[in-house]
Image (tube, grey):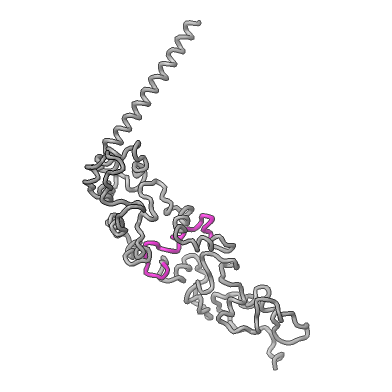
Amino acid sequence: MTGLTAGKQHMKRLRQVLLGCAFVGALMGMGCALAGDDIVLKGDAKCTACHDEGDSPEVLLIGKTKHGTNADTRTPTCTSCHGTSETHLKGAGKGDKSPLPDVTYSRKGKTPADARNDACLTCHQKDAKRMFWMGSTHQARDLSCSSCHRIHSGQDKVRDKRTQPEVCYTCHKEQRAQANRVSHHPVPEGKMGCSDCHNVHGSAGPKLMKRDSVVETCYTCHMEKRGPFVHNHEPVNDDCSNCHNPHGTTAESMLKMRPPFLCQQCHTPHVPADASLYRQTPKPPNSIGWNGASVTQGRGCLNCHTQIHGSNNPAATNPTPQFLFR
């Protein structure tokens, strides 16, 4: 029994050794394939001979992206984006003194933004979503595609609604503070992204809106606010941001100011209204007319004008009997 037990243990150890050798061999074969063979298309082997899993493992992650799909004939090669880089190849292996590729995409690189974008726009400008890139705000301020996108990463933060705002907040810090206020769109919750309203690649509308105007962009979700009504509220037809700050406010419904003070920016108040309650104490019950407290307390104008975006009912209905004012 002892000899049989020893034989079983010997066979078990032998299997473990063989499996270990097979695993090491597979790793070595994979390393040789990554270093010597093409990662994406023919012609990339001269790049991956140096930029392998040991030198630049993040470079090989492009194989997990759409730019690393062999089945797609549009897939670019390394030289499609970085140029032929002959001087870089000749200086390979010389340490930090090795010349950089013809086109580099790091923030510290010396390649102009237009030259970086040309490699991307060769394919992507054919898309209607990017037809307004030339002349857009971001293009005019020398932003490149690589300023927001990560090409060699399988997880491009700007393409995920949950992480996209953090990329935008790198420059738009004011909008970060507004989105963290009490009343905001569900951007911090990850249910919306900046690209739901803005086309960062350029737009025919103002403020890089996805539609031709601010109101048309808002109507994409808020269809109940679209008219036509018998009584239209002109600021609504003009620009929703006249009353709302879509990035976030401290007033309810993302209003720039709570009623009635917001309304009185345009409408002459029924009575002198003050942000404080000075001179706005309620009048005796038998008094006639408006009193200041009834206007500024509670919801103010919205106590009567509930359909502020537009209505088919008369807009100037006075609930007080007219004979009281004769």
Whether residue 270 appears in this view of the structure is: yes
Task: Give the image quarter of residue 48.
Answer: top left
Q: Is residue 280 left or right of residue 134?
A: right
Whether 203 is among the magenta residues is: yes
Who's the residue at 72% across and 90% down the image? 324
Residue 2 position, x and y percent, is: 50, 6
Q: Which quadrant holds residue 203?
A: bottom left
Return the residue nearer the eye: 247 or 88. 88
- Residue 232 lies, with reference to residue 124, above or below; the image says below
Name the residue: 51% across, 64% down. 247
Tell me the quadrant of the picture where the C terminus can be found.
Answer: bottom right
Count of marks overlaid on the render? 0
The quarter of the displayed image where residue 64 is located:
top left
The magenta region covers 185-207
Q: Which SS does the magenta portion mostly show?
A: loop
Q: Residue furthest bottom?
A: 326
Identify which residue is drawn at 48% across, 68% down: 218
Residue 86 in percent (x, y) is at 21, 46
Is residue 183 one of those drawn in magenta?
Answer: no
Residue 314 visible in the shown view: no
User: Where residue 270 sits in the image (x, y, percent)?
Assistant: 64, 84
- For image coordinates 61% across by 75% down, the residue present is 259
Side of 103 where 143 appears, left or right = right
Image side of residue 85 versus residue 170, left or right: left
Report the residue that reaches farthest toward the front.
97
Image vertical order of residue 35 relative to residue 185, above or below: above
Q: Give 310 or 238, whichever is nearer the viewer.
A: 238
Left or right of 68? Residue 300 is right
Q: Position of residue 11 (x, y in %)?
A: 42, 14
On screen, residue 47 above or below 303: above
